[in-house]
Image: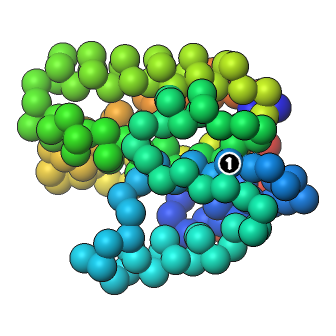
Amino acid sequence: MRILVTGGVRSGKSRHAEGLLAGTADVTYIAPGRRADGGDPDWDARVSLHRSRRPAGWSTVETADLENALRGAEGPVLVDCLGTWLTALVDDEQLWEAPADTVDTVVGARVDAVCDALRARPQAVLVTNEVGYGVVPEHRSGRLFRDLLGTVNQRVATVCDEVHLVVAGRVLKL
C-alpha cells in the first residue's frame, strides 16, 4: 500500500508515518531535504530528532535524487518529506526566479519520474506539508513554493492508495 501523509508543520505527520511502518525491519528512510550541516541550529536539531526516532534496523538515504532512491530501495520506503525535496529541487535547478513555464517543465518532469517510481513500489509512505490554508505569501518564492507543493501533493496522491491528513496529532483518512 502507498500512503501520502499530509498536514501542517508540527502536526504529527512524521510520527504518524513512522508508526505506519513500525515493526517493519527493512525500511529505507529517504530524507530528500537539506542535511544537517551546522549552519542552522534549528534545522540541525530537527534532523537530529528525526534521526533519533528511526529504528536501528532501518537504513537511511539522504538525497534529493528521490526518484532514483525510490527505484533503488529494497523493501518498504518512508519519504520525509516532499516539501524539503521540492525546496532542494528548486534550489538545485535555480528555479526561484525562473519563468513559470520553465519551472513547470522542470518540476513536472521530476514529479512524473517520482510518480513512475512510486507506481513500482508496493509499499511506501510519503510525508508532505499541506500549505496554502493561510494568507497569500508576500514574496514570489513563497507563492511559487505553495503552488508547486500543492500540485506535487495532488499528483503524488493520484498514485497512492490512501491519503492521511494529520491535524493536531489526529489522523483523518481521506
Q: Residue furthest right?
A: 23
The quadrant the N terminus occupies is: top right
Looking at the image, residue 98 sits to the left or right of residue 20; the answer is left
Q: Please provide percent x and percent y for residue 171.
A: 77, 55
SS of the residue at dot 1? strand
To which residue does mark 1 refer? 28
Looking at the image, residue 120 sits to the left or right of residue 26; the answer is left
Asked whether the viewer can see residue 11, the reply is yes
Q: Please provide percent x and percent y for residue 40.
A: 29, 77
Would you place residue 128 above or below residue 105 in this image? below
Asked whether the viewer can see residue 124, the reply is no
| Crowd tier of the residue under label 1, counting other residues whose Cα lies within 10 Å: few below 14, some 14–19, many 20 or above | many
Looking at the image, residue 88 sits to the left or right of residue 26; the answer is left
Looking at the image, residue 124 sits to the left or right of residue 47; the answer is right
Would you place residue 38 above or below residue 87 in this image? below
The residue lying at 39 percent from left, 24 percent from top is: 110
Quadrant hosting residue 56:
bottom right
The residue lying at 60 percent from left, 56 percent from top is: 60
**Viewer-proximal residue among 82 and 23:** 23
Q: How is the image coloured?
A: rainbow
The residue lying at 90 percent from left, 59 percent from top is: 23
Would you place residue 111 above or below residue 133 in this image? above
Q: How many marks?
A: 1
Would you place residue 122 above or below residue 5 in this image? above
The quadrant the C terminus occupies is: top right
Residue type highlighted by circle 1: Thr
The residue lying at 57 percent from left, 77 percent from top is: 49
